[in-house]
Image (cartoon, rainbow, N blue to C red):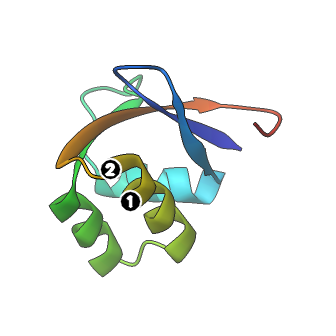
Amino acid sequence: MIRLYYNDTGDKVGEITDDQLQFLIDHLEEESLQDRDYYLERATVDMLESQGADARLLKVLRRALGERDDVEIRWSRSESGF
């Protein structure tokens, strides 16, 4: 599983699958091969939805945004759940 965290606080956002991570990698800009963070806005999540993101991934990303207009998240590979 892949864990998502808020970049600014380090708090956990949720978990996604390898396939969901690959979807993000394929659809979002990365600055390098080692880049593990993403800047999200509501419009970004809407774009991901229109590109075929699955419902569970969208739920995690929308939860990450919460009431915010934008957020930076990072991911880390995990062998176990929360």
Q: From what the image shows, is residue 19 above or below residue 38? A: below
Q: From what the image shows, is residue 40 above or below residue 57? A: above
Label 1–label 2 contact, CB within 8 A: yes
Task: Determine which quarter of the picture holds residue 31.
Answer: top left
Residue located at (48% from left, 65% from top): 59
Residue 10 x, y percent position in the rendering: 48, 20
Q: Which mark is residue 65?
A: 2
Kind of element beneath mark 2: helix
Residue 35 x, y percent position in the rendering: 37, 26
Badge 2 local density, few (<14 within 10 Å), some, or many (20+)? many
Residue 15 x, y percent position in the rendering: 63, 47
Does residue 1 appear anywhere in the picture? yes
Residue located at (50% from left, 74% from top): 54
Residue 20 x, y percent position in the rendering: 54, 58
Question: Left or right: where does residue 4 sit relative to residue 39?
Answer: right
Q: Amino acid at mark 2?
A: Leu
Q: Which mark is residue 62?
A: 1
Q: From what the image shows, is residue 20 above or below residue 29? A: below
